[in-house]
Image (cartoon, helix red, strand yellow):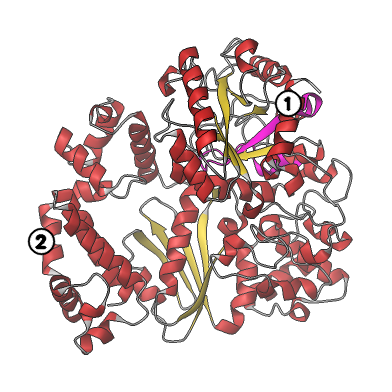
Amino acid sequence: MTNLELAWALAEMGDLLELKGEEPFKVRAYHRAARSLENLEEEAADLYARGALEEIPGVGKNLAKKLAELLTTGRSTFLDNLRREVPPGLREMLAIPGLGSRTVRQIHQGLGITTLAELEQAARERRIRTLPGLGSKTELAILRGLEMLREVQDRVPLGVARPLALLLRAQLLALPGVVRAEIAGSVRRGKEMVEDIDLVAAVEPDNQVAAVLVRHPQVKEVLAREPDRLALQTNLGLKIEVIMVPPEDFPATLFYATGSKAHRRALLRLAAERGLGAADLGLVTPRWLAEEEDVLAGGTTEAPGKGGGSHGEAAAAFATSGATAKEDTPGVAGGAPGTGVPPAHAGAPLTHAGTGTNAREEHAGVREPVEAAFYQRLGLPYIVPELREDRGELAAARRGELPHLVTLADIRGDLHMHSRYSDGVETIAAMAAAARARGYQYIAITDHSRSLTVARGLSLEQLKAQREEIARLNEELEGITILAGIEVDILADGRLDYEDEVLKEFDLVIASIHSGFRQEREQIMARLEAALRNPYVDILGHPTGRMLGRRQPYAVDVKRVIELAAETGTILEINASPERLDLNDTSARLAKEYGVPIAIDTDAHDPHRLADMEYGVLTARRGWLEPADVVNTWELERLLAGLKRNRHGA
């Protein structure tokens, strides 16, 4: 057995022990040893051969015996017994995203639930919230997860696919015979909805990729098993494809598998126009040569967004993306798409601008030179994966006008988050400390307004107490400034939840719709226009109200919202929550061309969710946004000056 398989077995033991109610320190011991095995450079089988299993961090005499049995027999008597003792339904519940062993055990002990059917019934009857520490959000997560388990969906949100892709990549790299492995496809390009997870692995002939991955605990079915390709389906219905190639074919295969198909074909057409073939670019793998043959035979589809008019490329991309009332996301500020950025910095990567390293990809070990040579042979600068949609990026590259994209390193603060005052789970001080640890200079606490009772919206008395606490914390804390904000509800009749006399006292105001989603477009737009024209509304939050994979946008005219934002000087939000990504990439790009400023905000309800900023930045990059377009890349003084101007209707 490989280290990875041993780690899976120990992790399952820990989960099942926790489901049984075993002492926490014992559970932690199994999980700690599992993590050690995943990161172990030497094979455990070799350690066993020389009697050194206890040299593995976290592995004592007891766990060493269990590992020895697994290594010699391929089975574990202890694990088999645990599987018999724990109701199968409880193990099945662990497949539900976000539902861990502790929560499953609590539900089992508190409500006597042993099957998925009983769990669903309890969630629908709102009985889960009667248990300590669990609430309506847990019930909603359970129902969502069960729906995903039941229905093999065509697409899942990036926030579901990307963590699994990162896990799979790390696990691939732990396998013998794997020289390199990277995420490809729509996950690498940062698309908001993903059909499958694509990975490319550079392997040696004696690799164990297929033999191990078919036994992965999250794999439900093996769809295809070929010498150079493995197709799997997870318990959630998500498809995984792993392409295995010799190391020398890795760069071209990663380039091909990253896509998009439209970008690949446009690249091949451009090469043909210049009298070059795929082989001249170094793209000599069978997949590239087959695609070239099809392109030259006339099997092409003209891409959207050709040309270079002021609103041409973004408007074309916006129109073809279906960014209507059924699919939307926010816009951005600042200058026009080609600002003469030097080619060396064009399409700058996710964090380290101009260094040739995409930080999202740097985490995965990918650096620009892997694919840069293919572009260079066409006389083009490197084009980052997020732009590879054939929405004018090749034309911009030819003109030397690729945008210098915003990166995580550019973000100086987060302007939308919640605390215990409303429906957040942490104190303001804890949120500020977490933000400071991320290197932020400022945050805005924007709890819910009074009408949103389900989220414990703040009364006028609570607002006063909160502002006093923020003032005190600003005196005590060093290295970060807390802005006193509010997420004010746009009510069904178009009024804001607080009067202007109250709103003007805040440092920052976000206005959002949280109810009346089924109103006709005329009513929705009247509500949004009233908010946008209010002199004390600085930001329009999650402008379309969509929840990816769960709720369609309300009947909003996104282009009109962008026009109103440009007219009134209101900032539009890219809500970075992976469930929202609202505005979307095409709307953000259109907003940029209208000069509308953008705030990338996490809407975090706990410190961990501050990390969702990465998803918002990915969306912004797909929308061609540069640092100047995003207000929370600005210094605090500039940001505050802009907000004051907006509030005074300048």
- When asked about the image quadrant of residue 30, the answer is bottom left
Does residue 198 show up magenta in the picture?
no
How far across and down, in percent of the image, does residue 51 sit?
Answer: 19, 86
Residue 91 seen by the camera: yes
Compared with residue 542, is residue 584 higher up or lower down, i.e. above or below? below
Helix, strand, or loop for circle 2? helix
- When asked about the image quadrant of residue 389, the answer is bottom right
Q: Which residue is mark 2?
A: 81
Comparing 348 with 643, the one in front is 643
Position of residue 614 in the picture relative to residue 129 (left or right) = right
User: Which residue is located at x 87 percent, y 75 percent?
Assistant: 275
Does residue 580 show up magenta in the picture?
yes
- When asked about the image quadrant of residue 10, the answer is bottom left
> How many residues crowd mark 1 within 10 Å: few (<14), some (14–19), many (20+)?
some
Compared with residue 200, is residue 445 higher up or lower down, i.e. above or below? above
- Of marks 2 and 1, which one's residue comes earlier in the chain? 2
Which label sits in the foreground, 2 or 1?
1
How far across and down, in percent of the image, does residue 168 sit?
Answer: 43, 64
Farthest-out residue, front: 475
Q: Which mark is residue 342?
A: none
Comparing 392 with 450, the one in front is 450
Position of residue 453 in the picture relative to residue 308 (left or right) = left
Q: Which residue is mark 1?
A: 644
> How many residues crowd mark 2 within 10 Å: few (<14), some (14–19), many (20+)?
few
How far across and down, in percent of the image, does residue 232 sit?
Answer: 42, 62
Q: Which residues are magenta?
A: 563-589
Q: Which quarter of the rendered picture does the C terminus lie within?
A: top right
Position of residue 49 in the picture relative to residue 510 (left or right) = left
Amino acid carrying mark 1 in the image = Lys
User: Which residue is located at x 23 percent, y 58 percent?
Assistant: 28
Helix, strand, or loop for circle 1? helix
User: CA separation, marks 2 and 1?
Assistant: 66 Å
